[in-house]
Image (cartoon, grey):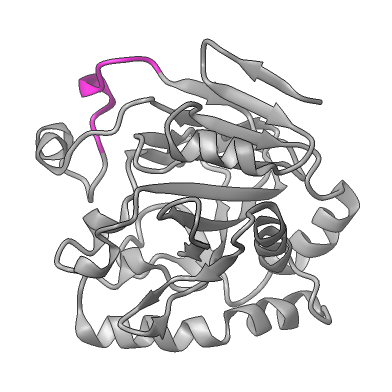
Amino acid sequence: MNTTNTILGVVERSELLEKDLVDLFTGKSLMLRIYPFIDEMTCKRWRLPLENSAELGRYSNALDVSVNRIGMTLFETENDAAKMDAYFESALGLYDLIDKIIDSDGSNPLRSLHADLENAWTKGSRVETINGRMMNPGIIRSFEANPEGGLPPHMDALYKDLPMCSEFAEMKSQLAANLYLSTPEEGGELEVWNYTPSLEELETLYSGDYDFIDRNKIPLSPAVVKPRVGELILFRSNCIHCVKPSRGGMRTAASCFIGYYDEEKPLSVWA
């Protein structure tokens, strides 16, 4: 299946291709859907132990947000030196931790996502570093079934998370990648606005809760898609996006960010 929704900028493929990644990075498209990326039986085998793991817990600095994760995120470090050290330490064992949880000898959702990215991009990919220290290569993220839950509009950009760090100045674009292992019966749609506010504009859009954005202040309508089990969805993460509340089951995905410098350099991944 190879289709493009020209109105929404949503491209659908059956495999991950370099030219489609380039279109995403350069803003020619908004979202890329790869389906099927992983078969449903494998997703079920992976997601059951992950969703029941004691390692699954809420963001340390957002305990009231009904989203759980395995793996520490850059968002949680808040530019604090001790938290950054904990983040780097957790990154070193992330792949092995997921292998242990799902009782795998090396086949896990993050490895599969990263391997396909490596194969699709001519110059390959690598895990991003900060001052030579390896960042977390990704997370398992699970949204609770909660009619008041989901994730309000926000944007993700490395220059926003680390405004004082100059080593990413040449990064031209950033994607979010989500490989869905389970989806709820109702809701859980992904909304993405083709709108990338500057840091100055962001200050006027915030709702007052964390770094969430007031959707009533967004000047256009979003593209809306409902993820499928086994689907990989990529989109430009510095575009405003959100996850709608859900009912009837968890919404679990292997997730990471993908950074693009130029076509002659490897892609980078982190969470």
- Residue 96 is left or right of residue 40, and the answer is left
Relative to 30, residue 79 above or below: below
Residue at the (81%, 80%) spot, across then down: 103
Q: In this view, does 150 lie above or below 256?
A: above
From the image, which quarter does the N terminus lie in? top right
Q: Where is residue 102 in the image (x, y as percent from the top left)?
A: 77, 74
* Residue 251 visible in the snapshot: no
User: Residue 236: where, in percent of width, then height?
Assistant: 44, 39
Residue sitting at x 48%, y 33%: 244
Asked if residue 125 lies left or right of residue 152, the reply is right
- Name which residue lies at 66% across and 34% down: 33
Q: Residue pushed farthest right?
A: 41
Give how far across and how far down residue 81 sits, in percent: 21, 84
Magenta part of the chain: 213-221
Q: Does the magenta-highlighted stretch encompass residue 46?
A: no
Which quarter of the rendered picture does the C terminus lie within? bottom left
- Helix, strand or loop for the magenta stretch, by majority: loop
In the image shown, does 63 or 9 lie closer to the viewer? 9
Q: Specify whether residue 13 is in view.
A: yes
9 lies above or below 175: above
Image coordinates of residue 199 in percent, x first then y, are 15, 43
Q: In this view, does 212 lie above or below 219?
A: below
- Look at the image and say whether residue 218 sits in the magenta stretch: yes
Rendering quarter of residue 145:
top right
**Residue visible at 42% across and 31% down in the picture:** 27
Q: Which residue lies furthest to the top in this view?
A: 7
Q: Which of 29 and 39 is in front in this view?
A: 29
Number of marks in the image?
0
